[in-house]
Amino acid sequence: MDSIIVTGNGPLKGQIPIAGAKNACLTLMPATLLSEEPLTLTNAPRLSDIKTMTTLLQSLGAEVSQLQDGQVLVMSSHALDNHVADYDIVRKMRASILVLGPMLARDGHAVVSLPGGCAIGARPVDLHLKALEAMGAELELKDGYVHARAPGGLRGGVVDFPIVSVGATENALMAATLAKGTTVLKNAAREPEIVDLAQCLRRMGAQIEGEGTHTITIQGVDRLGGATHPVVTDRIELGTYMLAPAICGGEVELLGGRIDLVGAFCEKLDAAGVSVEETAKGLKVSRQNGRVRAVDVVTEPFPGFPTDLQAQMMALMCTAEGTSVLEERIFENRFMHAPELIRMGANIEVHGGVATVTGVDRLKGAPVMATDLRASVSLILAGLAAEGETIVNRVYHLDRGYEHVVRKLEGVGAKIERVSDR
Ligand code: UD1
């Protein structure tokens, strides 16, 4: 199994290109199931999660081909011959549940394995199911699978989400495009990935208003057509690499970066003493002298501070001047990186959903274990700031969400390498 070895670094300098968003691509791909005509996605990221979604769509009878080294995905669902999303694929990736709404909306039936728990918490799918029920779906849970039917087709309804869910909003939005009548999604998620999905669906002929606000209204249409759509920039990859010069010092330009994707995060960087500037090509992040200041962080749905940047922000706070409090409000078990950071000399106390981090002068390299996607990259960031060598094991997590991580960081002067079987 591969490991990544990072050696503590001086200032970084250069440019890092930011890929298309994994989380947007994972909801745009199932949108192909809504139409018989081809959907082409450009600016797709090259990641193992995208391969898993490809395998899932192919298992349902969709055709998926990759062009331009995987940056362009051409998909066609003109002949779906299987409506069962198998446990063996779904268990690998929770986003698999996103095929449920589209399949049900187009063909009136679908069977999808329940994804089960994952390392960062229980993560149920009850909100996805309730939303589809509000549109007339008949659901039965049997042997670990959701059996969904809508014999006369889905019909418009009002879905009032009790809590904000990105995935449930996406599933309901896709399903509603082909439901009869009007669907109103209240307390909808406002993430940029939802806006991107709505834009793509509109290109396919859907009638949608209000994406990016709390209320999305969808007027169902009889059929959707084909489209070509560019995947939005990955704001989590962007935020992660913005932290590299924040941690090591230096100046790095993030190509394709946009402030509107990372507003709350930039406010925290600013408060910590890290400078972020808009350029013609993206965002430039620099930190010149001294340690950053400790800042407090609370994770919230967009436009708040993203839970997917909490682990990386903790890595920065490990060497900040002062004490910071990081409160995780989205997932109940998302501090698995803390014990690993402590092995590198960090001073962190975790009580429930709150981590208190008191900055130390310098972290020390150590062998550490990646436990999930964002945790693994936080350990790489910490390794960049540490004295000596940090060996990050189980990097397959990283391959799910970061393309060419070694090449991108090496390109700005980091000492990082990937090795097999160490
Ligand atoms: C998506 C992102 C993930 C990110 C998360 C929050 C993808 C592929 N993944 O995950 O990277 O961390 O948003 O920004 O886009 N919940 C329920 N019932 C449900 C659904 C969710 O109780 O049916 C709860 C979850 O356990 C969690 C909260 O709602 O506590 C938010 O989860 P949600 O927004 O649905 O996350 P995902 O869409 O799974």
Image (tube, rainbow, N blue to C red):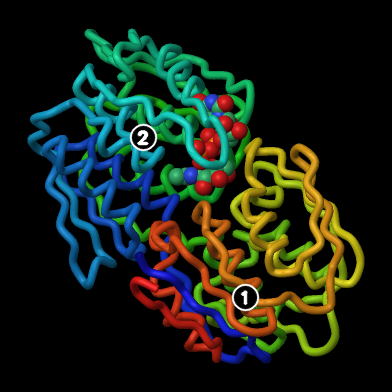
Which quadrant holds the C terminus? bottom left
Residue 20: image quadrant is: bottom left
Q: Is residue 27 above or below residue 268?
A: above
Q: Secondary structure at mark 2?
A: helix
Within 10 Å of disc 2 (Cα), the crowding (few <14, some 14-19, many 20+) is many
Q: Amino acid at mark 2?
A: Leu
Mark 2 to mark 1 CA distance (whole Å)? 35 Å
Q: Is residue 412 above or below residue 327?
A: below
Which residue does the image show at 82% across and 58% down from the upper left?
357
- Residue 74 visible somewhere in the drawing: yes
Q: Position of residue 253 (x, y in %)?
A: 58, 83
Q: Position of residue 191 (x, y in %)?
A: 56, 46
Q: Position of residue 358 (x, y in %)?
A: 86, 62
- Residue 285 visible somewhere in the drawing: no
Q: Which residue is mark 2?
A: 98
Q: Is residue 57 left or right of residue 214?
A: left
In depth, the one of 418 and 307 nearer the eye is 418
Q: Secondary structure at mark 1?
A: helix
Query: Disc 2, ligand 1: is the CB inside 8 Å?
Result: yes
Tell which quarter ligand 1 is in.
Answer: top right
Residue 165: image quadrant is: top right
Q: Is residue 199 left or right of residue 246?
A: left
Q: Give the number of the mark in front: 2 or 1.
A: 1
**Residue 383 badge:** 1
Q: Is residue 52 left or right of residue 213?
A: left
Which quadrant holds the N terminus? bottom left
Which residue does the image show at 61% across and 64% down from the upper left?
378
Q: Is residue 106 above or below residue 72?
A: above
In depth, the one of 304 and 311 nearer the eye is 311
